Image (cartoon, helix red, strand yellow):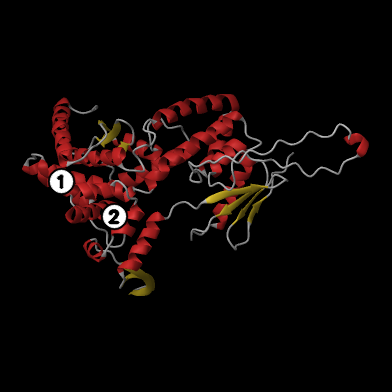
Amino acid sequence: MSQVASSVKDELERFLDRLWDAAVAFGLDPVPVDFEIVPAHAIYELAAYGMPGHYSHWIYGRDYWRMKRRMDSGQGRLYEMVIDTDPAVAYLLDSNTVAAQKLVMAHVLGHADVFKNHLLLKDGPKQFHHTLAASRERFAQYAQEYGADAVEAVLDRALSIQDQVSAITPRPEPQPRPQAPSPYVDLWGAEAAPPRRRVPRYALPTPDLLGFLARESPILQPWERDILEVVRLEGLYHAPKRRVKILHEGWATYCHHHLLELMELSSGEAIEVSRVHAQVATPDPLRLNPYWFGWQFAESLVEEYGFKAARAIWMEETDAGLVRNYLDQERMRRLELYRYRWVPGEVRTPRGPLPTWDAVYEETEVEALRSALANALAAGPPEIQVVDVTPSGVLELRHTPDDSLLDPEWTQLTLEAIRDLWGGGVVLYDGNAKPYRVEPRRRG
C-alpha cells in the first residue's frame, strides 16, 4: 500500500493478514492481491482505460471526463478498481474511511476468487497489462514515424469493431497447387482466364472480423496490422468478462458480507460497514442492481445446496446461464423480480397538462420472466461474420440472426471504417433487410 499514513497502512496490513486467513477458512481460493491506495483522479483514469499501461486514444480521455463529472456531482462513487492479473491489483480510493477500506478489501477477495476459479476466466491472460504497456511504446514509435493522426485514424477504425472478434480462427483446407501452363499455349491459344480470386488464409465464414482484416487486408502496412492485432487481443480479453458481471459483483458482495461478520470490528466500524453495504447492495425498483441481485442469488444457492456446491455452480455459470438454470418461483419472489410496461399519461399543471410515463406492474409467469431476463443478460454485441471475398475484391459480411437490430446510421459509419481498413467495397447482408453497401474510396 502507498500514499497513506503509516498508522493506517499498518492497521490495514494487519487486517489483510487476518482477512486472508478468514477467507481461506471460509472456503475461498483467491489469487494473491496487491492493494494500493490512490487518489480519485487515478481511480477515474484506471476505470476509463480499463488497465494500467494502456495505450492512449481520445475515447479514454472522453470516458475519464464523463466519469469525473458524474462522480464529482455525487451521482455515484468508485470505491475500488481491481485488475485481473496474477497477482491481482486492487486500487482503493484514498478518501474511503478505514472501515470502508476494510469492506472493499473483503469485496476484492471475492473478485480474486472468481478471477482464479471461474471457468471462463481462470485460464485467461493474467499478464495482459504487460502486452498493453509494450504496445503503448510501439504505438508511440509509430506516431513519430508515420504521424500521430495516422495512428489515431487506424485506432478509430479498429476500436469501432473491437467487439467483432473471436478466438476461433480456423484455417481453410489446403488448396491444390495450380498446374503450370502448357509451354505450347502460345501455339494452340487459350481461353480468356477468369478474374483472379484472392483466396483468404482464413476459413470462411468467420466471426473474427477484426482478426480477418488484420491478416487479410491487401492494403495495410505491418505497423497497421500490429495495431489491429493489439485491439483484437484486448477485445478477446474483455469478451468473457462481459458474460459474468452479475456473478462477479454478486460473489464479491456475498463474500464481503460474510467475511466481515467473521472479523473483529469496532461498533463504529460495524455501523460504517453496514452503511456502505446498504449503499451498494440495495434493490432498485426499476433496474437490476448486480450487487443486490448476485448477492441474494448466491445466498439462496448456498441455503439450498450448501456453500461448496453453490460455489461450484457459481464458478461454472454465466449470468444468463445462472438465471436460465436456477431462477425458480421462490427466487423470483426473493429477488423481487417483476415485469413492467410503460403506460403514457399526463399530469395537470398551472401551465397545462404535461405528458408522463408510468411503470405498471404486470403479472408474469416464472418461465416468461426467466426467459426474458436470461435473453437480456445473454445479449451482446451483434455478431458480424465475414462470408466471402468476391473476385472483384468486395468484402461480404453477414449479420447473424440474433434478434438484435442494427442502427442504420451507426452501421453505415462502421462499414466505412471497415472499408478503409479493407481497401475495397464492403456489403453487409442483414437478414431480409436491404443490404448495406459502401463503395471503394475514389483515388486521386
Residue 314 in picture, x, y percent from top left: 28, 49
Q: Is residue 98 visible?
A: no
SS type, badge 1: helix
Residue 293: quadrant of the picture: bottom left
Residue indicated by mark 1: 258
SS type, badge 2: loop
Q: Is residue 395 above or below residue 400?
A: above
Indicate which disc, 1 or 2, sits on the residue closer to the N terminus.
1
Q: Residues within 10 Å of mark 1 (few under 14, many from 20)?
A: few
Q: Is residue 116 visible?
A: yes
Q: Quadrant of the N terminus?
A: top left
Is residue 429 toward the left or the right of residue 54 in the image? right
Residue 101: quadrant of the picture: top left
Residue 377 in picture, x, y percent from top left: 37, 55
Amino acid type of the residue tagged 1 in the rendering? His
Whole-angstrom CA distance, mark 1 to mark 2, is 19 Å
Is residue 380 toward the left or the right of residue 74 in the image? right
Asked whether disc 1 touches disc 2, contact meaning CB atoms under 8 Å apart, the reply is no
Is residue 82 toward the left or the right of residue 23 in the image? right
Looking at the picture, tell me which residue is in the foreground, 87 or 341.
87
Residue indicated by mark 2: 289
Q: Is residue 193 above or below residue 381?
A: above
Looking at the picture, tell me which residue is in the foreground, 67 or 172.
172
Amino acid type of the residue tagged 2 in the rendering? Asn
> Residue lying furthest right in this view?
187
Is residue 240 toward the left or the right of residue 197 in the image? left
Residue 288 in picture, x, y percent from top left: 30, 57
Q: Quadrant of the C terminus?
A: top right
Kindly identify the residue that appears in the image at 20 percent across and 54 percent down: 305
